């Protein structure tokens, strides 16, 4: 942290710090539990929303020999699929509360000036996560088309519901979490953990790392999804460096 920043307003003893951590975790878990119950009540509309790209693709490409149906190959498959959709959906729905609890936990370690960024950080994190999930959902049709095409001709497509749900959910989480990286980059610049000049000098390695990470974390493994994740992340990386540079420059100017 920069010397110019004012020190934290309060310093917590260790036990109080641990109690605070426990409180934040409990509140986050309660928010996720309530959100999971909400998704459980809306299970059928949510399931139809997640399976729509597959059904649309089957209707558009009859040569793929699929009708958009999903199959439960075991007694527990349907139950497992429902629980996964509700759990992951509950986590997404509770994201604003979880992010707020995380921020409230780290606030005592921040200076007064750094605390003013709480609102923008949380709002931008929520927006970027939603944008990332939406992009993953939009690319799902192309990803499935690529995977079905590469399975070869005369192959009937019949998907197990648990595996399909896992693919869709992991795709959306990978994109959503990946889109949070610019927020982290800006935050690291503000607290002085990394300098904008360093990020600018290392831009080639950063972009290479982004493409490698996109290839690794994309569950479908298709090039379309990888590019759909890597290209926006590259742009967001450059924007994050620019924002961090402007904010740190403004803070330096104000101090001087």
Image (cartoon, rainbow, N blue to C red):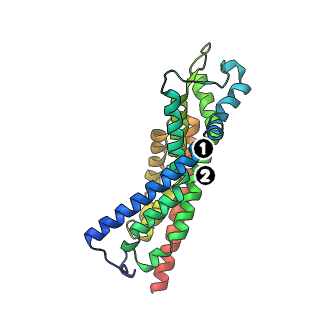
The residue located at (50%, 70%) in the rendering is 118
Give the answer, above or below, for where 210 lies relative to 166.
below
Contact? badges 2 and 1 (CB < 8 Å):
no
Give the answer, above or below, for where 26 lies relative to 211.
below
> Left or right of 100: which side holds 193?
left
The residue located at (44%, 70%) in the rendering is 190
Instruction: Identify the secondary structure beneath mark 1.
Output: helix
Q: Residues within 10 Å of mark 1 (few under 14, many from 20)?
A: few
* Residue furthest out toward the bottom: 256
* Numbered label attached to residue 146: none
The residue located at (45%, 53%) in the rendering is 206
Give the answer, above or below, for where 60 lies relative to 14.
above
Can you identify the residue that label 1 sits on? 41
Instruction: Identify the secondary structure beneath mark 2.
Output: helix
- Please state which of the two labelled residues, at mark 2 or mark 1, is closer to the viewer: 1
Task: Residue 107 in the image: state x and y as whole percent.
Answer: 41, 71
Work out whether residue 255 or residue 105 is closer to the camera in this orientation and state it: 105
Task: Residue 161 in the image: state x and y as whole percent.
Answer: 55, 28
The CA distance from mark 2 to mark 1 is 25 Å
Task: Residue 168 in the image: state x and y as whole percent.
Answer: 56, 37
Task: Name which of mark 2 and mark 1 comes first in the sequence.
Answer: 1
> Left or right of 252: which side holds 161?
right
Looking at the rendered image, the quarter that the C terminus falls into is bottom left
Can you identify the residue that label 2 sits on? 131
Work out whether residue 54 or residue 1 is closer to the camera in this orientation and state it: 54
Give the answer, above or below, for where 131 lies relative to 219.
below
Looking at the rendered image, the quarter that the N terminus falls into is bottom left
> Left or right of 33: which side holds 130?
right
């Amino acid at each position: 942290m920069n010397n110019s920043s004012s020190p934290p307003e309060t310093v917590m003893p260790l036990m109080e710090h641990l109690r605070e951590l426990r409180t934040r975790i409990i509140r986050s878990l309660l928010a996720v539990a309530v959100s999971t119950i909400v998704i459980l009540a809306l299970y059928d509309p949510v399931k139809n929303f997640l399976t729509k790209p597959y059904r649309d693709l089957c209707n558009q490409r009859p040569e793929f020999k699929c009708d958009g149906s999903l199959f439960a190959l075991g007694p527990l498959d349907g139950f497992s699929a429902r629980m996964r959709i509700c759990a992951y959906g509950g986590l997404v729905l509770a994201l604003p509360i979880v992010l707020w609890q995380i921020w409230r936990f780290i606030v005592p370690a921040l200076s007064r000036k750094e605390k003013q960024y709480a609102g923008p950080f949380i709002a931008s994190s929520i927006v970027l996560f939603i944008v990332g999930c939406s992009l993953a959902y939009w690319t799902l049709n192309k990803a499935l088309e690529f995977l079905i095409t590469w399975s070869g001709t005369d192959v009937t497509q019949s998907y197990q519901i648990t595996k399909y749900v896992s693919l869709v959910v992991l795709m959306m989480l990978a994109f959503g979490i990946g889109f949070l990286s610019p927020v982290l980059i800006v935050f690291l610049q503000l607290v002085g953990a990394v300098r904008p000049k360093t990020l600018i000098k290392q831009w080639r390695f950063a972009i290479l790392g982004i493409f490698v990470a996109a290839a690794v974390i994309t569950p479908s493994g298709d090039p379309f999804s990888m590019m759909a994740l890597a290209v926006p992340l590259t742009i967001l990386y450059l924007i994050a460096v620019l924002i961090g540079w402007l904010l740190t420059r403004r803070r330096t100017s104000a101090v001087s």
